[in-house]
Image (cartoon, rainbow, N blue to C red):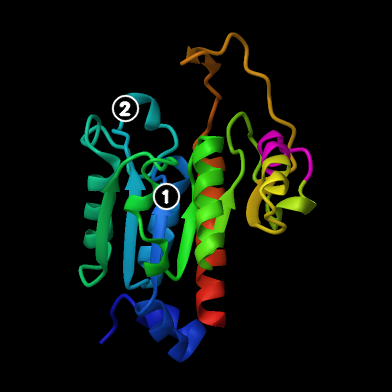
Amino acid sequence: MEDLYTRTAMLIGDKIEKLKSAKVLVCGVGGVGGYVVEGLARAGVGAIDVLDNDVFSPSNLNRQILATTATIGRKKTEVAIERIKSINPDCHSGAYDMFYLQDTAHDVDLTRYDYVVDAIDTVSAKLTLIERANEVGTKVISCMGTGNKLGTCFEVSDVYKTSVCPLAKVMRKELKARGINRLKVVYSKEEPIIPKDPPTENGRHIPGSISFAPAIAGMTLASEVIKDLIAE
């Protein structure tokens, strides 16, 4: 009888057992991270924890798979866990309702995970997460900018081989200063569009977005995690 794992096992064989025993932490479950969760859950990853401190708002509806009219106002982590369980009830899942910062990072034991996915928006949080993952030897992959972009050309690369992406440029500089000499990332070489009269929040311009760009980036992240897990 077919189940969640049948069609995937047709492609990867007994390596499906590696996915069943794997534990992944997804940090940020918005536009990009929500699709990462989707990809991991449907591939049969056995344990998926999520980290976020936000709730869904109407502006999330255009690009976030977990955002619906029914989830507006609800915690993103709570909805993510419900989604995981609705796909694979056997998947172990937990939530960290928090911002990942220097003074909260100690609340998350990264050594518990086979892989960490950085789908966080803020540079300081991304750097802290990547730095901690490197310190403890946990694999990490990071998403660069998806806002203000229409194209579908997202690539996998080392951060030091990236170009064009403004976020990747900042990350290269900051990671180099921290002595981190490699980082797998998903990024796009598409030149960002400059929105007309963009709204501001906390003194910074809010980027424009569209339905498919974060989805493609998120699924690319998920595919890299899955390929790395079964290659071990």
Q: CA distance from mark 1 to mark 2?
A: 19 Å
Coordinates of residue 33 in the picture (x, y in percent): 44, 48
Coordinates of residue 230 in the picture (x, y in percent): 51, 80
Q: Is residue 124 left or right of residue 171?
A: left
Please, which residue is most extreme toward the bottom here? Answer: 14
- For mark 2, does the 10 Å Cα neighbourhood hold few (<14), some (14 to 19), or many (20 or more) residues? some
* Quadrant of the image containing the C terminus: bottom right
Q: Residue at x 42, y 82 (%)?
A: 18
Magenta-drawn stretch, dominant element (helix, strand or loop): helix
Q: Which residue is mark 1?
A: 27
Q: Earlier in the sequence, mark 1 or mark 2?
A: 1
Residue type at mark 1 is Cys
Front in this rendered view, residue 37 or 1: 37
Q: Is residue 192 left or right of residue 212?
A: right
> Can residue 217 be seen from the camera position used here?
yes
| Placement of 75 over or under 197, stated as above or below | below
Residue type at mark 2 is Ser
Q: Residue at x 41, y 43 (%)?
A: 100
Front in this rendered view, residue 72 or 185: 185
Find residue 111 and name its label: none
Q: Residue at x 37, y 71 (%)?
A: 45
* Quadrant of the image containing the N terminus: bottom left
Q: Residue at x 65, y 57 (%)?
A: 183
Front in this rendered view, residue 191 or 168: 168
Q: Indicate the quadrant where residue 40 lies.
A: bottom left
Magenta span of residues: 163-171
Q: Are marks 1 and 2 in contact (CB under 8 Å)?
A: no
Q: Indicate the quadrant where residue 188 lies.
A: top right
Q: Which residue is mark 2?
A: 57
Coordinates of residue 49 in the picture (x, y in percent): 32, 59
Asked if residue 164 is among those painted magenta in the image, a careful observer would answer yes
Asked if residue 91 is among those painted magenta in the image, a careful observer would answer no
